[in-house]
């Protein structure tokens, strides 16, 4: 478990095989509740290579000195990401 926001990651290994590769992360908020956005890829087991880039936003709560994931929202495609960007850009400009 992560004790600091900088230690949080979406990377995942099953044994020695990496199944989720983190490409980038941005800390949106810090504190007792932390919000992070990640860019990552999942392993395509059939092809034995990492698939398309995906995005996720995760919320963590710090309890007893460690962060635990409480919720997540996965953005499954570049098209969906662009729609979110466009909508937020419009809303923020209003």
Image (spheres, grey):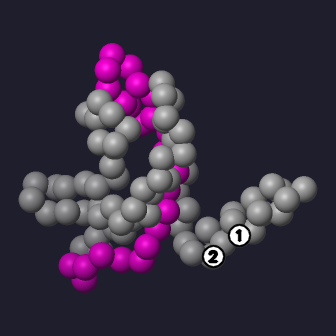
Q: Which residues are magenta?
A: 47-72
**Image: 30 above or below 54:** above
CB under 8 Å between discs 1 and 2: yes
Q: Is residue 72 visible?
A: no
Q: Which residue is mark 1?
A: 83
The residue tagged with tag 1: helix, strand or loop? helix
Image disc number at residue 79 = 2
Residue 64 is inside the magenta segment: yes
Residue found 41% across the figure and 25% down from its top: 62
Instruction: Using the image as rendered, state which of residue 37 and residue 54 is in the foreground.
Output: 37
Q: Considering only vertical position in the picture, is 18 above or below 69?
A: below
Residue at screen point 14% across, 63% down: 17
Q: Quadrant of residue 68?
A: top left
> Quadrant location of the C terminus?
bottom right
- Label 2 Cα crowd, 10 Å radius (few <14 / some 14-19 / many 20+): few
Horizontal side of residue 89 vs 81, given as left or right: right
| Residue neighbourhood size for the residue with mark 1, other residues' Cα within 10 Å, grouped as few (<14), some (14–19), many (≥20) | few
Q: How many marks?
A: 2
Q: In this image, 27 relative to 16: left or right?
A: right
Element class at badge 2? helix
- Residue 78 drawn at (x, y percent): 57, 75
**Which residue is outermost to the top?**
64
Residue drawn at (54%, 39%), measured in percent from left and top? 29
The kind of secondary structure the magenta stretch mainly shows is: strand
The spot of residue 43 in percent (x, y) is 28, 70
């Amino acid at each position: 478990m992560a004790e600091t926001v900088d230690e949080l990651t979406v990377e995942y290994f099953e044994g020695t095989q990496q199944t989720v590769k983190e490409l980038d992360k941005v800390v949106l908020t810090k504190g007792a509740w932390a919000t992070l956005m990640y860019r990552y890829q999942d392993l395509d087991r059939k092809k034995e290579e990492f698939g398309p880039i995906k995005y996720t936003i995760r919320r963590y709560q710090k309890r007893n000195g460690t962060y635990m994931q409480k919720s997540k929202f996965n953005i499954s495609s570049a098209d969906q990401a662009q729609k979110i960007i466009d909508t937020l850009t419009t809303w923020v400009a209003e």
